[in-house]
Amino acid sequence: MLRTCISRKSGPHCARHTFATLAIEYGMPIDIIAKILGHTNTNMTRRYAKISEANINREMQKIGEILTA
């Protein structure tokens, strides 16, 4: 989505989507992002952000560390 935003005129929706996606990528909890964006329901926030392979790998590593402790 970021490439799409760069190739066309940027607007508030593009900025919000980019922020939400990057915040998810860097591990910010979805409920915090929802609060920042002014959403009352995290389902709306989830529409902005897609789950990436990096995010999945990070979460699986956390679980692995808990299970091996």
Image (cartoon, rainbow, N blue to C red):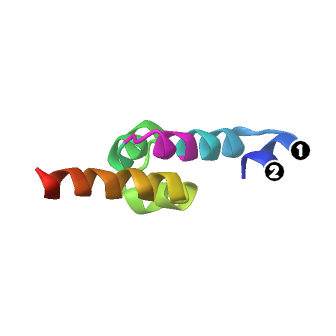
In this picture, residue 45 sits left or right of residue 8:
left
At numbered mark 2, what does the secondary structure look like: helix, strand or loop?
helix
Res. 8 visible in picture: no
Q: Main secondary structure of the magenta part?
A: helix
Residue drawn at x 24%, y 57% is 63
Label number found at residue 4: 2
User: Disc 2 versus disc 1: distance between alpha carbons?
Assistant: 5 Å
Residue at (55% x, 59% y) in the render? 50
Residue sitting at 54 percent across and 61 percent down? 47
Could you say which is closer to the camera, residue 66 or residue 12? Answer: 66
Q: Amino acid at mark 2?
A: Thr
Please tell me whether residue 11 belongs to the stretch shown in magenta: no
| 67 or 27: nearer the viewer | 67
Magenta-span inclusion, residue 27: yes
Query: At 27% across and 50% down in the image, what residue appears?
Result: 62
Question: Which amino acid is tagged 1?
Answer: Ser
| Above/below status of 14 relative to 57 | above
Question: Whole-percent x and y of residue 57?
Answer: 43, 56
Q: Which residues are magenta?
A: 21-28
Q: Which residue is mark 1?
A: 7
The answer to whether one can see residue 54 in this image is yes
Quick one: which residue is furthest to the left in this view? Answer: 69
Asked whether, in this view, residue 64 is left or right of residue 57, the answer is: left
Q: Report if the CB atoms under discs 2 and 1 are less than 8 Å apart.
A: yes
- Crowd band around label 2 with a 10 angstrom C-alpha radius: few (<14), some (14–19), many (20+): few
Residue 52: name its quadrant: bottom right
- State left or right for residue 32 relative to residue 66: right
- Number of numbered markers: 2
10 Å crowding of disc 1: few (<14), some (14-19), many (20+):
few
Q: Position of residue 64 (x, y in %)?
A: 24, 57
